Image (spheres, helix red, strand yellow):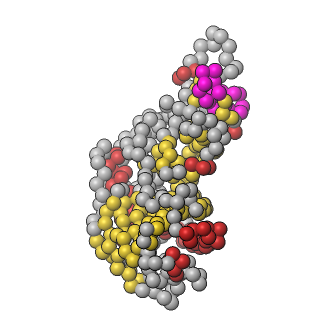
């Protein structure tokens, strides 16, 4: 179904985007937890600067369409889900009752009378491919300017989603471009200074780290290794935790911890709202008995996010002057990989070829 404001096809561009500008397309973005979408309810979201209606039919199917009625621009999410005579479920605009299927196609314009010659079937709003995976809802954003691109791969699947529903979920908006949020997420050396607390690592207790990295699906992985002795938060897990940390485009980082037969997965999803705002969602699953203390642990997770958010606000004071940034080896190598991955993803899509991961297996060293 064409977008209500479709534009002529743009020429493919292979030039890399400047850091802190542009958002990746032709990929899945985390949008919500499955439990956030209730049957029959309509939710308004802004994703990648676009108004998106997320909903779930009464039959349980998730859908996403552009949240602007092409008649008078009212948000469709302010309307309601109604049933047609044939059983189909449609979204009814609150302004004049125009109805749209979950595929974006217009199904009815109540004000029309016989003989007025309007082809309702030619009217529609953009449909965004959406899918559920492991209790999460993902939305596919295409690079096709007409909005007709379909997913070329299934939504991501993560090892370690155990213990039923997530034990901890927290969200926060950062007032920054997604690039800066991603780099902050994967930065291995800021913790002793930003996350100062009795239960976290201290700037006075830093150690030299040596970690092996390998390329992974659309990203890279810090190979499984024993827990960091500098971070006391692992102490509550007991045993001998082993940790594997993975990053994947467009902005997902997860820490998979094994403690004997038990597992814990801490997944962080970055979702761009606009070019200057990014939502960070922290989701934790585990079958470890310590997660029975989730109500006690959640404030610590929240404190971590607030500390990062405060640093983003400080960083914005300097970024508004568009300064050059000096990145080091090896502590900033992951940030450089992100740039390379983003550049290759954009080029491979523009050139219609397979993605070639630019990350090479290596060992990095830093102190933190």
As drawn, which residue projects farthest toward the bottom?
204
Say which quarter of the image contains residue 123: top right
Residue 254, image x and y in percent?
A: 45, 63
Q: Is residue 298 magenta?
A: no
Residue 42 visible in the shown view: no
Picture layout, residue 22 above or below residue 299: above
Q: Is residue 87 magenta?
A: yes
Q: On the rendered image, what quadrant is the C terminus found in?
A: bottom left
Residue at image location 46% in from the left, 86% down from the top: 206
Residue 351, image x and y in percent?
A: 30, 45
Residue at image location 65% in from the left, 27% down from the top: 83
User: Quick one: 59 or 45, which is closer to the camera?
Assistant: 59
Residue at image location 66% in from the left, 40% down from the top: 41
Residue 232, image x and y in percent?
A: 52, 81
Q: Give the left or right position of residue 352, taking residue 308 as reference.
A: left
Q: Give the left or right position of residue 155, taking residue 176 as reference.
A: left
Segment colored magenta: 83-99
As drawn, which residue projects farthest toward the top?
115
Residue 28, image x and y in percent?
A: 45, 49
């Amino acid at each position: 179904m064409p977008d209500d404001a479709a534009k002529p096809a743009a020429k493919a561009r292979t030039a890399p985007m400047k850091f802190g500008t542009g958002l990746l397309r032709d990929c899945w973005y985390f949008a919500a937890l499955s439990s956030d979408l209730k049957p029959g309810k309509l939710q308004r979201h802004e994703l990648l600067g676009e108004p998106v209606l997320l909903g779930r039919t009464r039959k349980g199917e998730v859908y996403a369409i552009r949240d602007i009625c092409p008649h008078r621009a009212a948000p469709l999410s302010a309307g309601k889900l109604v049933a047609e005579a044939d059983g189909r479920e449609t979204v009814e605009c609150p302004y004049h009752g125009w109805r749209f299927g979950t595929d974006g196609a217009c199904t009815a314009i109540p004000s029309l009378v016989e003989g007025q010659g309007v082809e309702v079937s030619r009217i529609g709003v953009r449909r965004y491919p959406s899918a559920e995976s492991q209790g999460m809802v993902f939305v596919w954003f295409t690079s096709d300017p007409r909005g007709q691109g379909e997913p070329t791969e299934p939504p991501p699947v993560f090892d370690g989603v155990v213990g039923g529903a997530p034990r901890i979920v927290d969200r926060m908006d950062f007032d920054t471009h997604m690039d800066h949020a991603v780099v902050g997420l994967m930065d291995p050396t800021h913790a002793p200074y930003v996350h100062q607390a009795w239960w976290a690592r201290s700037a006075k207790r830093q150690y030299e780290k040596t970690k092996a990295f390998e390329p992974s699906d659309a990203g890279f992985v810090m190979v499984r290794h024993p827990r960091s002795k500098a971070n006391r938060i692992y102490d509550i897990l007991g045993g001998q935790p082993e940790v594997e940390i993975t990053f994947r485009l467009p902005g997902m980082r997860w820490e998979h911890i094994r403690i004997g037969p038990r597992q814990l997965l801490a997944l962080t999803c970055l979702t761009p709202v606009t070019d200057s705002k990014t939502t960070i969602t922290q989701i934790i699953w585990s079958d470890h008995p310590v997660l029975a203390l989730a109500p006690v642990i959640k404030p610590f997770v929240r404190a971590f996010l607030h500390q990062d958010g405060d640093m983003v606000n400080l960083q914005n004071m300097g970024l508004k002057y568009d300064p050059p940034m000096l990145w080091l080896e090896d502590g900033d190598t992951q940030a450089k990989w992100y740039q390379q991955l983003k550049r290759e993803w954009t080029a491979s899509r523009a050139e219609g070829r397979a993605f070639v991961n630019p990350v090479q297996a290596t060992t990095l060293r830093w102190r933190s």
